[in-house]
Image (cartoon, rainbow, N blue to C red):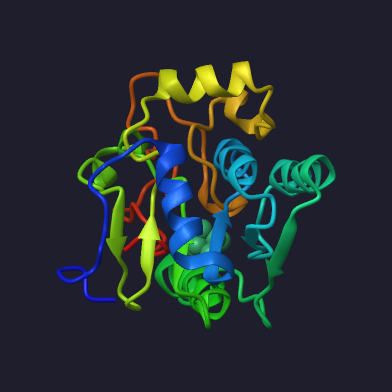
Amino acid sequence: MDLASANLPTEISAVAAIEWATNEFGADLTLLCSGQDAVLVDLALTVDPTIELTFIDTGFHFNETIETMLAIAARYRPNLRVVVPWRHLDGVGGPGFCCSDHKVEQLDHALAGRRAWLSGLRRADGPSRSEAPQIEVDRRGLVKINPMVAWTDAELADYERQHDVIVNPLRARGYPSIGCRPCTSPSADGEDPRAGRWPGSDKTECGLHL
Ligand code: SF4
């Protein structure tokens, strides 16, 4: 889609962004679920319970992340699609190659035939995301909607409390950002919330949101 000519709304509420996406794209829309929490799932399935959820099972997730996804599946009975790489090459070629193979390529597969996707990305996730728009066109030409992009950590926590949302238990153990087990450490208070991702390297993003 050409962003300049697209009929995209300016920044709106998270629910309004999801409603716009479901009206605009219908079944050609998928929601990328990371297993970190179910806030976006809860918001989106309240708007439309038939929205497809996509979970990329890299093979390297924490047990807590898989348990979070199982809890989401049990509570919402969603239209859930689990994408699994055909091979697992733990550490081969370094994190850049590993993420490209186990995450980015899998998302490419998952989005084939779709026109748009929903993501839980927020500007408060860290400096690398501080300028993220709510609606954009990704490198594939698909529309990417980040409904909660402007939400603060406090707003996220409020929603989790008020709606008894499923949250990955690692969050309470010092992991504000949860990726794969070999590449994720806790972050200290006051640190960039994504400081625990690929610690000791200058890598800050797996590539799903680039
Ligand atoms: S986060 Fe780590 S284990 Fe997961 S795909 Fe990327 S490099 Fe591989």
Q: How many circles with numbers are drawn on the protein? A: 0
Whole-percent x and y of residue 61?
66, 54
Q: Is residue 147 visible?
A: no
Query: Which residue lies at the image location 46% right of the left edge and 39% below the top edge?
Result: 15
Vertical relation: 77 (above or below) 64: below
Query: Which residue is the extreme one toward the front?
Result: 23
Quadrant of residue 44 within the rendered picture: top right
Vertical relation: 147 (above or below) 173: below
Q: Quadrant of the N terminus?
A: bottom left
Query: Which residue lies at the image location 24% right of the left edge and 39% below the top edge?
Result: 127
Q: In this orientation, which residue lies closer to the viewer: 188 or 23?
A: 23
Q: In this orientation, which residue lies closer to the viewer: 145 or 129?
A: 145
- In-image side of 5 versus 113 (left or right): left
- In-image side of 164 versus 74 (left or right): left
Q: In this orientation, which residue lies closer to the viewer: 33 or 30?
A: 30
Query: Which residue lies at the image location 53% right of the left edge and 32% below the top edge?
Result: 175
Whole-percent x and y of residue 136?
28, 60
Q: Is residue 171 visible?
A: yes
- In-image side of 209 versus 202 (left or right): right
Query: Which residue lies at the image location 59% right of the left edge and 41% below the top edge?
Result: 36
Query: Which residue is the extreme one toward the right?
Result: 74
- In-image side of 201 versus 187 (left or right): left
Whole-percent x and y of residue 170?
63, 32
Q: Quadrant of the C terminus?
A: bottom left
Whole-percent x and y of residue 158?
51, 17
Vertical relation: 23 (above or below) 43: below
